[in-house]
Image (cartoon, coloured by chain):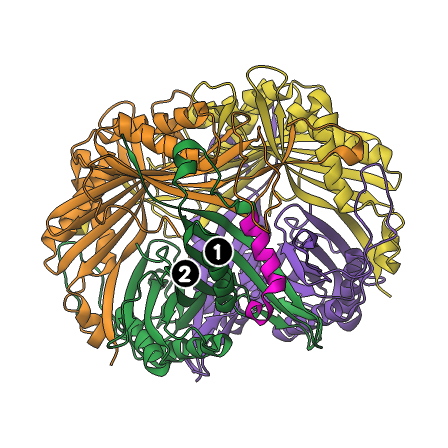
Chain colours: A purple, B green, C orange, D yellow
């Protein structure tokens, strides 16, 4: 007879927008919240006995209610996730682990107007909060940040086998779409300031690093974050190499000294790596495993 | 025997990136170019005789070559589209009409670095250029610009029928994702300045307008553009009403005075309209018909 | 002073599923309905006077109610669209034109079970119904039908210019994703049988036609439909050339006689054309203009 | 000084189509292949020394070459993945672990023609192959299989808390989009027959099971697979609850006895679970961790 292994369930992608009207100008947060619960839920799988099942509809309702009830915690995805995860773990007895993932869509003030906004679009801020056995882990993150440099990138002197045909290059366009998660060892961080600082560090390092490989750039980016942010124990980066291929214009009698490129869709290189603070404890369940093959 | 009606063909979505290295800092443009040709192409349809068919591969090659050859015209989607459309119409005898659509992805300088960029993400700039019978039409545009206002929007006193259940409101969240095209009657415009000015006008009007309906806001936005930009003869706006529904928190003993909203996906209202300069000539084939039901 | 031009508005993408339980086995239809209204709606644009505005929420309600009320008309996207368009045009006085677009997602019975289904996925069936000045136009259609042939496709003897580098070929893989709309001159057609017949004709012609160009295949497909279906006055086809490029395996000491291909994403050729029944009247507003550059 | 943790890299989404022309009719496979390598790659991260780096371009070339070289192994995603993963692990000394993920897009013969095909669209077949320390793991899978039942689904007698408002139901529409992976303990399986059998079992169980919760249905589906397939040690299922909400037609004077539903997009329940053969060994790195929160 087969047996039930690990399970989890919850409500994914509750799209909640909170408006803060008590000040002038107004402020907003715009979240996509997914919550997953594990615990004493075998009965519903085995017999259809739902006595222990908190409905996923109630999970959604909780997200919405907490957008009102959770006070200042609503203002950042990390603190909002912590409030929600603690609630599910503490207030629903059969829950042993709660994981709350929050995507936060940044908005900018529009036309310097106190009540109007435009969606930034340049990236999505993320937070993964895991509450288990009375303890919390927070991984902050970013995805969708597309960056490109027109020089200061080389790639040569690599291993060659029977299938290697790539010519080496001393100057190429390098572009990537940054997905990163970093484990916050300090649960009382100033979440907004911390995120902004990491974004600056990732951007500045990508821009200023003379790259011999995207792997090297990845390590430089991760190292800079860990060195500059004492509250971050580990960072995981996933960097697709968004290839820009030099177009051969010779057939048309034209030179192309690094000017015209084809931005390819697929396939793409995918470079993934972890950078850890020396002596940092294990990150446990902090990271969203959806990142990484 | 059936007969052949209107046809067109070409290469869609050539993704070309041009780097300008002659100055410091570097500059880039990032385009997605689609070109469609109409003309004396019946033979290939009727008999498979390809004597008159410029290959779509050559269309792609032309886009890439022009990214090098077209000089300063490469810097803006309108001027790049004009150069390409004129070439197809003038240099390929069997072409009677050429339409070139350019999507332009804006990038910002990253970390104040002269060779690094991040993709803006907030919108896509568009241009549709049509060359026909020796004459050109240019429609500039924008899509993907998501804006929201937290107040200054009412909707009430509407028509009611048997299927009307919507309660009127004096204060709602209003959000939309702007798609707009505007017909440029001046083909020597300063394309960059023109686009920036229209974006400011659209944004400022959306932000500052006290709205009684999204229809009214649409007309206000279009009117402001036409009034402030003498070179624009007509503008077409497509504004989905990205509904933000107030969540009922009563069951949880909570008040919700315009604070917690559900950002819905589907269905959505869709408001479309045209605003024309008084006395402007007909726009002819200027607009991309892909906008609009 | 700018003036208001053409406008339309409505509710897009109402996702309604209707279950027919009166028989055994059960049956379902699965629709995505978008309705757009034009008419006497200037006031809301010009002054925010909504007296004439049927709310888009009521449009959604109507779609849902008609999924119950419209009887057998619910079973096909064409007849459902006709019922809805007629209602808006006839029962809402200020409406002069109603256009209803229905996407229908086909489902297959699952495991020969009377109450279980799986979504077919191979294509989406479409219908565009336009009611104007007391008259109706129906365009049936299909999109997302991906077809491929491994031989019987040539492309050579084409026009060459300075930018032409494509080698001619006597045998290539040809693949496309069919989008088609056809104008139904008979409004009492057996919609299900008609759609099935057109799908068979399009498929059989694509499969059996020895192609000298995708343009020729397009005309053959359209001609077969019009010849076999007396109720169809005109068909418009949009056929992207989903390029399958032969991979060069020479560097690895391997021959590749038409065996290994790279399925490219972008750019792609895009071939569009119209085939008309001889003597058919003009199709008027029958076709969804969203198809076509 | 920060230290480098786990890394992996490779080429993602190589889109390769193989045509088998040696028989009549022709046959095709259509794959999207992603390969990730781990091992002795620290130098490139730490110093930019690429001496050990097999280029991702060579990874792509290998995928393409193996589509010709790998003989009968090319015909199934599992055997193709095994051939590739073994090559990277055995033939590239610095590789300690190779993971190859293959998405396979099924095609049906079109119009009974020996050289023409249409893409099935109903689901994607997947395989994840991991080669590590001289041993291989294979997880077969499916994604995108959308199924629905119109009755035989109840949900009631659940846990209630302050945020629970869902009414219990004795009859609801239940729909889901199946993502599943199952660990193959037998590496010489008849991959095609095995996949087909699992697909039948998943479908038949979903259709025939009288459900008290989607959790119960999940366990029933997993149990049936493990019981019927002795070569499968463990299966992981991820089942979003694609909510179909009964539309309230009361305001329009209409009854709605389970006939008209709104197919919602977001949020959605997400039920995930594992079913293991009694006594099966641990699955090790068999499963793609990208499935699961």
Residue C98 is left or right of residue A92, and the answer is left
| Label 2 Cα neighbours within 10 Å, binned few <14 / some 14-19 / many ≥20 | many
Say whether residue A119 is left or right of residue C68. Answer: right
Dot 1 falls on a residue whose secondary structure is: helix
Between C12 and A163, the residue placed more toward the observer is A163
Cβ–Cβ below 8 Å for labels 1 and 2? yes
Report whether mark 1 lies on the same chain as mark 2.
yes
Q: Is residue D249 visible?
A: no
Q: Is residue C263 shown left or right of residue D61?
A: left
Name the chain under label 1.
Answer: B
Q: Position of residue A224 (x, y in %)?
A: 78, 68
* Residue nearest the observer in this picture, C205 or C74: C205
**Which mark, residue B88?**
1
Question: Start and end of the magenta stretch?
Answer: B58-74
Where residue D28 sits, quadrant-wise, is top right
The residue where tag 2 is placed is: B131
Q: CA distance from mark 1 to mark 2?
A: 9 Å
Assess whether residue C120 is covered by the magenta stretch. no
> Residue D150 location in percent, x, y?
34, 32
The residue drawn where x is 49% and y is 69% is: A29
Q: Quadrant of the N terminus of chain D?
A: bottom right
First in residue order: circle 1 vs circle 2: 1
Residue D87: in sight, yes or no? yes
Residue placed at 61% from the left, 58% from the top? B65
Which quarter of the figure has residue A235? bottom right
Residue found at x 48% / y 48%: B10
* Host chain of mark 2: B
Q: Nearer the viewer, residue B149 or B170?
A: B149
Locate residue C6 relative to residue A276 in the image: left or right: left
* Label 1 packing within 10 angstroms: few (<14), some (14-19), many (20+): many
Residue B169 or residue D63, whichever sits in front = D63
Vertical order, A170 against D253 (above or below)? below
């Amino acid at each position: 007879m087969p047996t039930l292994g690990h399970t989890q369930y919850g409500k994914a992608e509750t799209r909640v927008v909170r408006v803060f009207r008590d000040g002038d100008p107004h402020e907003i947060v715009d979240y996509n919240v997914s919550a997953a619960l594990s615990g004493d839920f075998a009965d519903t799988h085995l017999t259809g006995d739902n006595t222990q099942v908190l409905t996923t509809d109630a999970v959604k309702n909780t997200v919405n209610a907490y957008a009102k009830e959770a006070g200042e915690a609503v203002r950042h995805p990390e603190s909002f996730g912590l409030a929600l995860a603690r609630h599910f773990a503490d207030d629903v007895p059969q829950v042993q682990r709660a994981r709350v993932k929050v995507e936060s869509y940044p908005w900018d003030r529009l036309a310097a107007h106190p009540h109007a906004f435009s969606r930034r679009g340049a990236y999505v801020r993320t937070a993964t909060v895991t509450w288990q056995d009375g303890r919390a882990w927070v991984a902050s993150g970013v995805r969708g940040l597309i960056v490109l440099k027109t020089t200061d990138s080389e790639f040569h002197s690599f291993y060659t086998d029977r299938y290697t045909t790539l010519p080496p290059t001393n100057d190429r366009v390098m572009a990537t779409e940054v997905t990163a998660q970093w484990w916050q060892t300090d649960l009382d961080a100033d979440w907004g300031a911390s995120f902004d600082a990491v974004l600056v560090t990732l951007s500045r390092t990508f821009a200023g690093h003379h790259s011999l490989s995207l792997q090297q750039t990845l390590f430089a980016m991760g190292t800079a974050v860990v060195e500059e942010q004492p509250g971050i124990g580990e960072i995981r980066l996933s960097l697709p190499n968004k290839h820009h291929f030099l177009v051969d214009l010779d057939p048309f009698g034209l030179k192309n000294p690094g000017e015209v490129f084809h931005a390819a869709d697929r396939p793409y290189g995918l470079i993934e790596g972890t950078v850890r603070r020396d002596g940092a404890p294990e990150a446990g369940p902090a990271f969203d495993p959806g990142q990484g093959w």
